[in-house]
Image (spheres, helix red, strand yellow):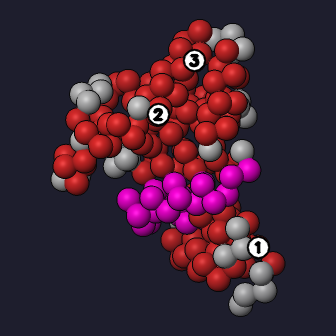
Amino acid sequence: MNSLLADAAMAANHCPDSGIRERVRFAIQALEHLPRHIDTWQASLARNRTLADCLKIEPDHLTQSKLHACTLCDRGDFLLALPLALYCASFAHDDPDHSFLAGACLQRLGQPAAAAHFYRIALQLNEADAASAYRLGECLEATGSRDEAIHLYQWTVELARGSFELRRLQDLACKRLARLKVT
């Protein structure tokens, strides 16, 4: 994944939007210091505090980073979005949306095993999230964990049952199950 961050740093150098460029550079720098922060704040993290709390990172800063990452994802620029998503997921690990966003970037960048890690966290934080269940199933299927993928697709179908908003996701999960020949 370090090579992806190096690629993101190079891409940030060519980003015409100075706000995004600086925010991506900041996120990469923060991620480089992550091991030191974890060592320093280990006791606080064990008590379920986030690094953002420990380091007194303003919630608005994380919100803006997440919004920039979402904007970049909407444009299809998952490489530039990745450092921002990882920054949010690492420093505010208690928000399932942050983990989902990091997983989405990694999945779109062809890293299903790494993406599965973040989708799993998102699903642990919100076990009723059908999108996280489906995406985790996709990643597990891509990494050859067929039985686990089947379980996640079945869980997606159950979570989506009776919800019109989730009907498309339920249909996608059913198609995956049919392709895997599960009844």
What residue sits 46% from the left and 62% below the top? Answer: 123
Q: Amino acid at mark 1?
A: Lys
Viewer-nearest of labels 3 and 2?
2
As displayed, is residue 52 above or below residue 61? below
Q: Which residue is mark 2?
A: 31
Tell me residue 161's x, y (percent). 55, 73
Q: Secondary structure at mark 2?
A: helix
What residue sits 42% from the left and 51% below the top? Answer: 96
Q: Which residue is mark 1?
A: 175
Mark 1 surroundings within 10 Å by alpha-carbon count, few (fewer than 14), some (14 through 19), many (20 or more) = some
Q: Secondary structure at mark 1?
A: helix
- Quadrant location, the N terminus: top right
Mark 3 surroundings within 10 Å by alpha-carbon count, few (fewer than 14), some (14 through 19), many (20 or more) = some
Q: Earlier in the sequence, mark 2 or mark 1?
A: 2
Q: Which residue is mark 3?
A: 20
For the residue pair 89 and 72, the one nearer the viewer reads as 89
User: Where on the picture, by quarter, is residue 146?
Assistant: bottom right
For the residue pair 113 and 17, the one nearer the viewer reads as 113
Tell me residue 39's x, y (percent). 29, 43
Separation of residues labelled 1 and 3 (CA atoms): 38 Å
First to last magenta residue range: 110-134
Mark 2 surroundings within 10 Å by alpha-carbon count, few (fewer than 14), some (14 through 19), many (20 or more) = many
What residue sits 71% from the left and 90% below the top? Answer: 183
